[in-house]
Amino acid sequence: MKTIVTIATFVAMALFAQLSSAQEVSDNNVIEKLKQQKERVINAEKEALKKEVEEINEKLVNEEITKEDAQKLKEEVAKLHALNIENRIAIIENKIALLERNEGDAIEFLEKDLEYNFTFLGFNFGSDKDRKIPYDRRTTSNLVIAFGLNNAMVDGQSLDDSDYKISGSRFFEIGWAWKTRVFKNTNFLRIKYGISYTSNGLKPTDNRYFVENGNQTTLEEFRVELDKSKFRMDNLVVPVHFEFGPSKVTETEKSIRYSTTNRFRIGLGGYAGVNISTRQKLKYKENGDRVKDKIKRDYNTSDLIYGLSGYIGFGDMSIYIKYDLSPIFKNAEIEQNNVSLGLRFDF
């Protein structure tokens, strides 16, 4: 029991000493923080004034206000922020005077404003307000959804002569992408990368369907009239693009952010992944019965999927094109490569 009391006494004394030390913050250190706060106040008010002037100029360009009104509004907001600076600086200077006059006894009144923490035995004590906001966020993320027309490219054959219906063959993609700024002081070039699920569908022409004969997969005439013949390949891929385009920078005393909202952009790159599923769906009538066949098998499709892709657009929406360098079918007498064209949305 005596040992427990001794340990508890030691811990209590250590805690008291630590708390006392935390209260004895250097006057010079506190004053320096207050001076830095003055600089941040000035910069924040200047940034706010700049934004308001830009909004006034935009209204003037759109002929929502006259030149005289614009000049009057600019003078009013300039006066407002000048007074804000004057009043906020006066508050900080009063805090400095209070601290100097009381020789450190006034620190307890300034704790929340100075946002400092103290530590004891490796633990940090402080409120949620003390958590720092990342000043420069170089990486962001977003949802990607794309869809459109799908078909196959064959050497010496145009899409007009394709074995697949133009309007009936479609693709779909959904995934998550990260975007990282390449250079420190400009957002003109970004790397966009992520992971996506893609589904490429093909609808054969002329009442045909796919037949797997050994290591060959061919299109053959079906025995009865088909109501539907659809072939689908599902893939899991990792797309990587270099994205170019202007952006808007917003800088405050706490953060700097680059935004590509409502900005033109171009993305060039490619993708690589694996085929996770291949299936064929057939619908037809036979002997008076409606039949639906869903056949899931390999069909000699490529296991590895890789290709080139790119997009060009404005804001969240882009025109999107993809071309598989990997063939649809392995060991095929005539190589076919999947090609997709549609719309891409980066939310």
Image (cartoon, grey):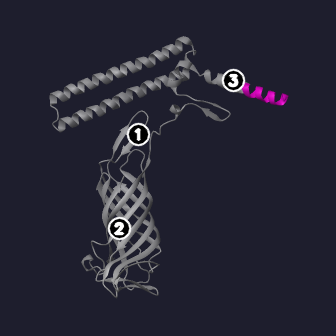
Can residue 154 be seen?
Answer: no
**Coordinates of residue 214 in the picture (x, y in percent):** 46, 87
How many discs appear? 3
Residue found farthest to the front: 288
Give the mark nearest the N terminus, 1 or 3.
3
- Describe the element under mark 1 as helix, strand or loop: strand
Q: How far apart are marks 1 and 3 (CA)?
A: 40 Å
Q: Nearer the viewer, residue 6 or 220?
A: 220
> Nearer the observer, disc 3 or disc 2?
2
Q: Mark 1 points at which residue?
A: 256
Would residue 64 appear left or right of 121 to someone viewing this image?
left
Q: Mark 3 points at which residue?
A: 16
Q: Name the residue under label 2.
A: 171
Can residue 303 be seen?
Answer: yes
Main SS of the magenta part reads helix
| Residue plotted at (30% across, 57% down) | 318
Q: How far apart are marks 2 and 1 (CA)?
A: 38 Å
> Nearer the observer, disc 2 or disc 1?
2
Up/down of 186 relative to 84, above or below: below
- Describe the element under mark 2 as helix, strand or loop: strand
